[in-house]
């Protein structure tokens, strides 16, 4: 193929991707009132699934925080004239990007794959599938676990009773989108480590050497994400992060010394 034929194929890929995003944006724009009431604002009410689950668990383990407060509700306010309209549009676009992300990556794959070898195609397919699955798992963890706990703590925290909390819509949406997106990116850590391992930049020994340092850093990160003094809330965020660390250590390649040690252990066992 000539250079301009490649450009034409790329143009088709871009047009399909942009078309899918615009189509989904229009769809989400029409459904946004329902999405806002039942999904985006769901953590603001006491009947959110995580709160009800923790309330049920609290009946069997009194050491857990009390999430059975039926009066809990976060009421948002709007302080700028055009905020609701622009948030309606921007949220529709963000959701469209999120849902269309696998399709956009697939379109890029159809453009790149003809230039790859068979082995490269096989690894790229696995990375594409794993990356998408881990990203959406991270989004789910952020939405169902991390963001509700963070919201619950910050919405009820007061430096003084004379200073009531009045949370703006802009502030809520900024934290909602940012925290969930960050969790999606954090869950790409195993894929990133696998890529770096195949490039020869890290090995399994790196994770063994710095495991204690990682635990301290992850505890600090968990405390930053959910600024609560409650050990249960801290552990709920820390455990998934540490699980990602161990998963990353498992997917990377061992170095030559580690392979020799594992072979010797296998021979000794036999």
Image (tube, grey):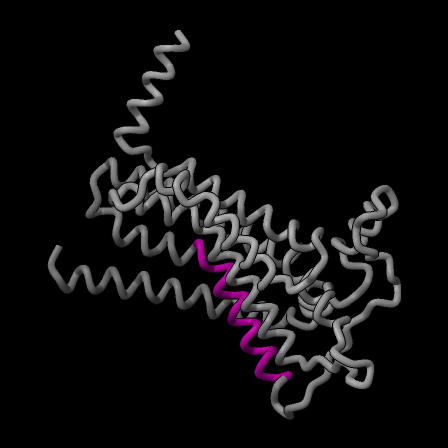
**Which residue is the extreme one toward the bottom?**
81
Left or right: 83, with 161 as reference point: left
**Which residue is the extreme one toward the left?**
2
Left or right: 143, with 25 as reference point: right
Q: Where does residue 100 sit, x and y in percent of width and height?
A: 47, 60
Q: Nearer the viewer, residue 61 or 85?
A: 61
Left or right: 29, with 102 as reference point: right
Q: Residue at x 40, y 68 (%)?
A: 18
- Residue 34 in sight: no
Tally the numbered discs. Answer: 0
Quadrant for the C terminus in the image: top left
Q: Where does residue 168 sit, x and y in percent of width and height?
A: 68, 82
Q: Nearer the viewer, residue 255 or 28?
A: 255
Left or right: 239, with 97 as reference point: right
Q: Nearer the viewer, residue 93 or 11?
A: 93
Residue 90 colored in magenta in the image = yes
- Residue 83 in sight: yes
| Residue 146, above or below 247 | below
Q: Where does residue 218 sit, x and y in percent of width and height?
A: 52, 53
Quadrant for the N terminus in the image: bottom left
Q: Residue at x 30, y 25 (%)?
A: 259
Point out the stretch of residues depicted in magenta. Answer: 84-102
| Residue 133, above or below 89 | above
Residue 111 colored in magenta in the image = no
Dominant SS type (magenta): helix
Say which quarter of the image contains residue 125: top left
Q: Residue at x 60, y 60 (%)?
A: 223
Q: Where does residue 147 sit, x and y in percent of width and height?
A: 64, 62
Q: Residue at x 81, y 53 (%)?
A: 52
């Amino acid at each position: 193929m000539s250079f301009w034929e490649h450009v034409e194929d790329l143009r088709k890929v871009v047009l399909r991707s942009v078309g899918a995003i615009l189509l989904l944006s229009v769809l989400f724009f029409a459904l946004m009132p329902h999405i806002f009431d039942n999904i985006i604002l769901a953590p603001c009410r006491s009947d959110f699934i995580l709160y009800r689950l923790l309330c049920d668990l609290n009946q069997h383990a009194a050491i857990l925080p009390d999430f059975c407060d039926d009066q809990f509700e976060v009421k948002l306010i709007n302080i700028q004239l055009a905020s609701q309209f622009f948030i309606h549009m921007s949220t529709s676009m963000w959701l469209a990007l999120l849902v269309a992300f696998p399709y956009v990556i697939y379109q890029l794959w159809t453009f790149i794959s003809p230039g790859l070898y068979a082995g490269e195609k096989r690894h790229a397919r696995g990375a594409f599938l794993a990356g998408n699955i881990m990203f959406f798992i991270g989004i789910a963890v952020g939405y169902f676990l991390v963001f509700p706990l963070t919201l619950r703590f910050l919405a009820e925290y007061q430096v003084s009773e004379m200073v009531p909390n009045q949370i703006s819509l802009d502030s809520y949406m900024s934290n909602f989108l940012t925290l969930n997106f960050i969790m999606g990116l954090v869950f790409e850590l195993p894929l990133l480590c696998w890529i770096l391992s195949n490039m020869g930049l890290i090995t399994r020994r790196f994770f063994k050497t710095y495991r204690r340092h990682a635990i301290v850093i992850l505890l600090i990160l968990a405390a930053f994400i959910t600024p609560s003094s409650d050990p249960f809330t801290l552990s709920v965020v820390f455990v998934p992060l540490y699980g990602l660390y161990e998963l990353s250590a498992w997917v990377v390649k061992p170095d030559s010394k580690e392979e020799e040690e594992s072979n010797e252990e296998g021979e000794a066992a036999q």
